Amino acid sequence: MKFAIIAVLATLATASAQAVDCLVTPSDPSCVSYVLPDATIKADLDGLCTQMPFMPGCSLYKSCQGSSKTDQWCTPFSLLADICAVDMPRMRDCKNYVALCGGNSTKPEICTKAPMIDSFPTTKKASALVVDICTEMDMAGCERCPKPKPGAYAAECDTLGTYAILCKAMPDMHQCATWKSMCSASSSTSSLSFQSSEYCAAGVGSPEMNPPAMRMYFHGGFADYVLFETWVPRNLGQYVGTWFALFFITLFYQTIAAYHASLEAQWAAAAALEDEISSKSDSSVPLTGSVSTSILLHWVHLWRQPWTMTEVKQNFIRAVLTFVETTLGYALMLVTMTFNVPLFFAVIMGLTVGSVVFSRQRAMVSGKGTGNANSGNSGCAGCG
């Protein structure tokens, strides 16, 4: 009889413990080890991200799902915390999280084992920061997030990913203080460190998530934009290939410049010889009066003369060479403005080698220029 009574009491105690609803009384001692079922967490996340897919927490949820990541910040309950702890606690699908981890002093262990990311931005703040950056400076990545319509709660785009891309490129912008805080080591046991994620760490994740940082000072490293958005060397092989490509482009620039200068000298010598032959019958306007007035009158007289077929051919060649030479010259200038030291010296080495390779050709042009006054008019922008 005694054993029967003990068994009944034990059964009643178990039933009483099981009767505790931890979503109603999470501070109950029996709820310390309570874990919200995975199916419930997934249903809550899916509900939240169906209603507002552009929330930062939903962007992270999508990223974690797409790559099947196992990082701590990809645990379902932590993802729910990113949305419900601070950002959207009043949304219907946050009621389970708020009931467990809301304002109670005693909470289930899961609230501290899978917390939200430290300094994780809210939807409204992430949107405002992205809009502020892209209004101030139209950077690569701004096209991902169109400016929200007047009265809209936030930009309807991946604000978390866009914010990370912009701040990886220019981390010293004042708008990136939140990003720096999010990506620093967590100083609290109640929040999660995010610093090794693709949103924070350099070289982690897709190339899109790792734009070259814009550094306006001499530096090394592989990743830098080289003239085009898609020309970004990211490993040693690509970087060496880029170095030699720039070296040979600079050498080609020197080739065009030397060839252009030689042609101008040749044309000037031929024109001088022709002028000398026809000087006795020259009917040009005499250079009388002040020098500046005489030169202008002579220019007007030259402009009024129709071009010969020889001049048409020469001017066509001159225009093509000037276009190519100037384009290459300014493109190489932009390369040096990346401030990448090895790429800078790729251009310098190309100019140096080119000056030696074409030294005799330039000497010939200089010699002709001494003997013919007209040979100085090369019509060439940026000829070395």
Image (cartoon, grey):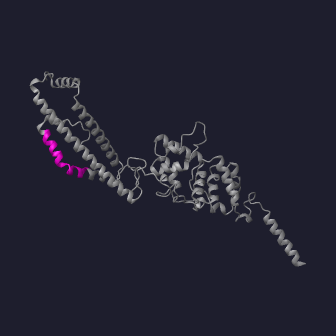
Farthest left residue in view: 280
Q: Where does residue 163 sit, x and y in percent of width and height?
A: 52, 48
Q: Is residue 199 left or right of residue 247?
A: right
Quarter of the figure with residue 319 = top left
**Residue 274 in the image: x percent, y percent?**
13, 31
Residue extending farthest to the right is 1
Q: Percent position (x, y) of residue 253?
A: 28, 46
Q: Nearer the viewer, residue 171 or 139?
A: 139
Residue shown at 80%/68% (left/top)? 14
Does the magenta segment cover residue 353?
Answer: yes
Rendered position, 166 above or below 190: above
Which residue is located at x 20 percent, y 48 percent? 358
Q: Is residue 165 magenta?
A: no
Nearer-the-camera pick, 245 or 18: 245
Compared with 291, 15 (above or below) is below
Which residue is farthest front? 309
Q: Name the residue nearer the viewer: 214 or 373.
A: 373
Q: Residue at position x 20%, y 35% from top?
A: 377
Return the x and y of residue 364 as percentages of the image width and height. 15, 44
Quadrant containing the N terminus in the rendered view: bottom right
Q: Which residues are magenta?
A: 351-369
Q: Quadrant of the C terminus?
A: top left
Q: Tell me if I can see residue 221 in this picture.
A: no
Residue 221 appears left or right of 260: right
Q: Is residue 138 left or right of residue 125?
A: left
Q: Is residue 55 visible?
A: yes
Q: Report how many numbered discs are placed on residues in the image.
A: 0
Question: What is the chief secondary structure element of the magenta stretch?
Answer: helix
Name which residue lies at 58% across and 43% down. Answer: 156
